[in-house]
Image: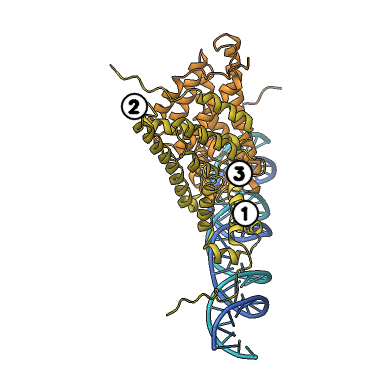
Chain colours: A yellow, B orange, C blue, D cyan
DNA sequence: GCAGTTCTGTAGCGATCGATGCGGAAGAGG
DNA sequence: CCTCTTCCGCATCGATCGCTACAGAACTGC
């Protein structure tokens, strides 16, 4: 009953699955889910279609894994931003991260979570819904962070954390669209700086 | 040499081209340029592929004409907003129009100019570039309107019209993404109301 | 009636889509 | 060596893509 330490049997994989996945991220990021064909993906990944199916299942599962990799890599600024000490620091880090990540010269412009499947044909409905959930999850995490800031006294008690989170994520998504349209990093960062000079957003005056 | 008042020669068209174009707008709006197949489009338009090609040229030209129709119809709020008397009224009308237009219950959610071709395969590059120009043109019109507001004294003289226009269009594009993600009209309008309580955006303090 | 012109429905074009079957290659264990 | 397992390259699957050739239908002018 001893644990066998022997390596995997059979012919070993002839490519690095992690590196292939990162290549796939770039293709999905630039061309979108349906705009990235298997031929384009496998060429960039350096493997054949057979190897892709054996390693990742199918195109949809490859995309889901690519989105996870994107979330941990180029999109990792969100998780790091949520750990900033104050709500203003959080918002500043989110928007600065969005500007930087969506305008890197050596990478596709824009945000993979925004632009890779905003609309699809009927066959892409599940991926589109998956990305809707991805975006809404991002919003929820920001809202929960701002709720904690209200509870801690970092934000005024009358602050609506959901509204404030909606403001920040709307700016972030808008930045992604602007970056995909070729707008430059400096201009977007200047806009973010100006927007954050007002913090937090004034709340709705109570009707009394 | 009298002007002939006779009708066109040959078999008359058996459908209303205007109505067919409006149907095409809805399909492109919902599924995007590449996500809308000819079969899906012609079925919604109620005509055969032959009739579509005779009336509109090809799929790309149909999309361009559909985008024009969208700009004049559901996207017409922008042109109307630019005629508001003050810069704040302009911004308020743009953002309220974006919220309303992207969240109509009986129409596709989101903005056709944002979501119909943020990413494409190689064959859709021209349409994608056309939409990039469409979005950048929207920004330019807002910037020029704000420049006029500065010239007229409606906005403080130190105001950067381009930065302010970038702020408004970024919010508008972000609203389109949120609407495409299923976020409701009331929440988006509440966010807009809060954002516009700060107006105009404070400018970068001069280094002196 | 007839000829000329234009629109429409069917049927199908070549190309590409995502996805697979199959046989050989490459490793581990005996 | 041989067997077993897994991976890979090639060829190809049926379906769908955007697009069009062709023939008949529908209308105007003579």
| SS of the residue under disc 1 | helix
Which residue occupies the extreme front position in the image? A2
Q: Using the rendered view, name the quadrant where residue A186 is placed.
A: top right
Task: Say few, some or many: other residues with alpha carbon within 10 Å of mark 2 (under 14 / 14 to 19 / 20 or more).
Answer: few
Chain assignment, label 1: A
Please name which of the two marks, 1 or 3, marks the residue nearer to the observer.
1
- Identify the residue under disc 3: B59
Cα distance between the residues tagged 1 and 3: 31 Å
The residue under the point 42% across, 24% down is: B194
The residue under the point 45% across, 78% down is: A2
User: Looking at the image, which is closer to me, B38 or B88?
Assistant: B88
Instruction: Answer above or below: position of B38 versus A60.
Output: above
Q: Which mark is residue A23?
A: 1
Quarter of the N terminus of chain B within the rendering = top right
Q: Are both tags, 2 and 1, on one chain?
A: yes
Instruction: Answer above or below: position of B4 versus A20.
Output: above
Residue B64, given in percent of the width and then of the height, sits at 60, 36
Q: Are both tags, 1 and 3, on one chain?
A: no
- Identify the residue under disc 2: A157
Residue D8, given in percent of the width and then of the height, sits at 64, 69
Cα distance between the residues tagged 3 and 2: 54 Å
Cα distance between the residues tagged 2 and 1: 46 Å
Residue A180, given in percent of the width and then of the height, sits at 60, 38
Residue A149, given in percent of the width and then of the height, sits at 39, 33
Q: How many marks?
A: 3
Quarter of the C terminus of chain B within the rendering = top right
Is D24 left, or right, of A85 in this rendering?
right
Chain assignment, label 3: B
Q: Say whether marks 2 and 1 touch (CB < 8 Å).
A: no
The residue under the point 59% across, 11% down is: B157
Q: Which mark is residue B188?
A: none
| SS of the residue under disc 3 | helix
């Amino acid at each position: 009953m001893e644990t066998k330490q022997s390596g995997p049997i059979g012919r070993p994989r002839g490519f690095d699955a992690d590196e292939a996945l990162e290549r796939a991220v770039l293709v999905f990021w630039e061309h979108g889910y349906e705009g990235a064909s298997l031929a384009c993906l496998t060429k960039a990944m350096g493997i054949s279609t057979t190897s892709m199916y054996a390693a990742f299942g199918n195109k949809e599962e490859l995309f889901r894994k690519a989105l996870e990799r994107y979330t941990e890599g180029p999109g990792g600024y969100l998780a790091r931003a949520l750990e900033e000490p104050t709500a203003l620091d959080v918002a500043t880090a989110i928007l600065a991260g969005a500007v930087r990540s969506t305008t890197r010269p050596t990478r596709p412009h824009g945000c993979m979570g925004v632009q890779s499947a905003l609309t699809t044909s009927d066959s892409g409905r599940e991926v589109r819904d998956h990305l809707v959930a991805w975006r809404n999850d991002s919003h929820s995490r920001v809202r929960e962070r701002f709720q904690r800031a209200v509870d801690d006294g970092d934000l005024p008690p009358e602050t609506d954390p959901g509204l404030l989170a909606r403001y920040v994520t709307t700016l972030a998504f808008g930045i992604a669209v602007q970056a995909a349209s070729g707008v430059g990093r400096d201009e977007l960062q200047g806009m973010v700086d100006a927007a954050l000079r007002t913090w937090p957003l004034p709340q709705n005056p109570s009707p009394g």
